[in-house]
Amino acid sequence: MVPDEPEAGLNAALRHGARAARDRHGAAAVAAMSADLPALRPLELGRALRAAAAHPRAFLADTQGVGTTLLTAGPGVPLAPAFGGGSRLRHAASGARELTLPDVPSLRRDVDTGADLRVALELGTGPRTTALSALVGR
């Protein structure tokens, strides 16, 4: 197995995806984000991406301040993902700039527990997440 191939795990898949995007679109900026953001608001994502564009690499920590929900790399800069438990400290140690944006709660609210899901539902989720949550009694 090649270390940067998708089947080598999440971070390898993200490196592979960033490389594939740049192969197709040139030395563009790239971003990776958590897939468990059911309350994500496009305006908040736009705000974070605009703030991140001022730095070669940037990241946004999750609400708990332990993980990472968004990692960006400017044109030609390696993404260098280090997602997984404790990723906030790894991304900071790698030189990525932490974004401290107070107005992006939906982008910081990943869902790892039932309590996280309840908070995401309070923020407002899409119709499918809301409907499924009602079925399972969350």
Image (cartoon, grey):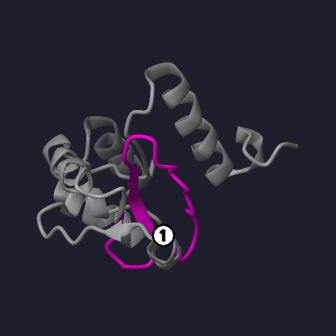
How many labels, in total? Answer: 1
In the visual, does 2 lie left or right of 37? right
Residue 62 placement: quadrant:
bottom left
Q: Residue furthest right?
A: 1
Which one is nearer the viewer's eye here, 105 or 33? 33
Quadrant occupied by the C terminus: bottom left
Identified at 63% across, 53% down, the residue is 11
Type of residue at label 1?
A: His
Task: Tell me residue 131's x, y (percent).
Answer: 32, 41
Quadrant occupied by the N terminus: top right
Residue 110 placement: quadrant:
bottom left
Considering only vertical position in the picture, is 56 above or below 89?
above
Q: Which residue is mark 1?
A: 91
Considering only vertical position in the picture, is 117 above or below 27?
below
Identified at 70% across, 40% down, the residue is 6
Task: Tell me residue 66's x, y (percent).
Answer: 44, 78
Task: Tell me residue 104's x, y (percent).
Answer: 18, 60
Q: What is the span of residues highlighted in magenta in the rendered image?
A: 60-87
Type of secondary structure dominating the magenta stretch: loop
